[in-house]
Amino acid sequence: MTFFSSTEPILRIKQSALDFQDRQGLLCLHCQIGKKTLFSSFYTRIDQSFILWGLICAAIFITAQFLPISWTIQAGWWSVLTLMGTVGMVVLTDFWVKVECLRWILYCWVILIIAGVVLTDLSIFLGWGELLIRLCPMWLGLSALGYFCTGLGMRSRAFTLAGFLHLVGIVLLQYVGGWQFLTTGIVMAVSLVVFAEVQWDMNSSSDYKLLTSEQKRFNQKQHQLRQLTC
């Protein structure tokens, strides 16, 4: 078995034949006027976590770019929001990462997020100028590290490429002048929304010890259905 799945596309349209762990907490959205469907999609708890963080990133960096609110007030607001988002992420993803034996990835993201919040707040409240002017590359770098860990754990090319994309974003910051916060927000938020809207590649190595025999058989059938639609 290769480390990355060579038979699965990096990104593709979502498949409806979901495994048992993906169906828990599934959110289905359908918007229709008459007989015309305007929007129809579904979101697993992992997708919901992506959307949650996409909204948080957009709110933080757009506010920092456009609204004349003091840094200390923003630091307080965003610290609370980020910690709430971290708790939400843990709640949403806990069962899935347990089944997939990927809890260490969740721990990595929690550590990176808390480290980022602590460094951001210290730079603002203690006046660490050198770090304060580098908040955008710092957050892109932390996100890149998180994506590399995710790509390694999930054996996913999509998440690995997302890590490189965030590193490219760091390079681009020197060319966007005073639009660094907006650029950072776009890179981070758009990446998260894309992952929520599509199916990304993953080469699972879990034997699903936490699932019952019936649930494992269900996953096998779902896998066969996905193979037929590839």
Image (cartoon, rainbow, N blue to C red):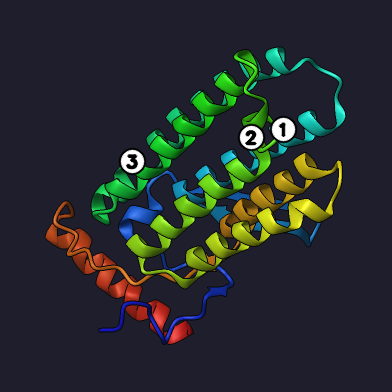
Where is residue 86 shown, x and y percent of the image? 46, 31
Query: Is residue 145 visible to us here?
Result: yes
Identify the amino acid type marked 1: Ala
Image point (71%, 39%), residue name? 58
Q: Position of residue 84 (x, y in %)?
A: 51, 24
Above or below: residue 132 compared with residue 22: above
Relative height, residue 209 to residue 143 (above, below) = below
Location of residue 1 in the rendering, given as x and y in whole percent from the top left corner: 25, 84
Cα separation, mark 3 vs mark 2, equals 19 Å
The image quarter in which residue 172 lies: bottom right
82 left or right, relative to 187: left
| Distance Cα–Cα, label 3 vs label 1 | 24 Å
Alpha-carbon neighbours of circle 1 within 10 Å: few (<14), some, or many (≥20)?
some
Name the kind of residue labelled 3 in the image.
Tyr
Residue 107 — which label?
3
Q: Which residue is mark 2?
A: 56
Q: Amino acid at mark 2?
A: Ile
Res 59 label: 1
Q: Classify mark 3: helix, strand or loop.
A: helix
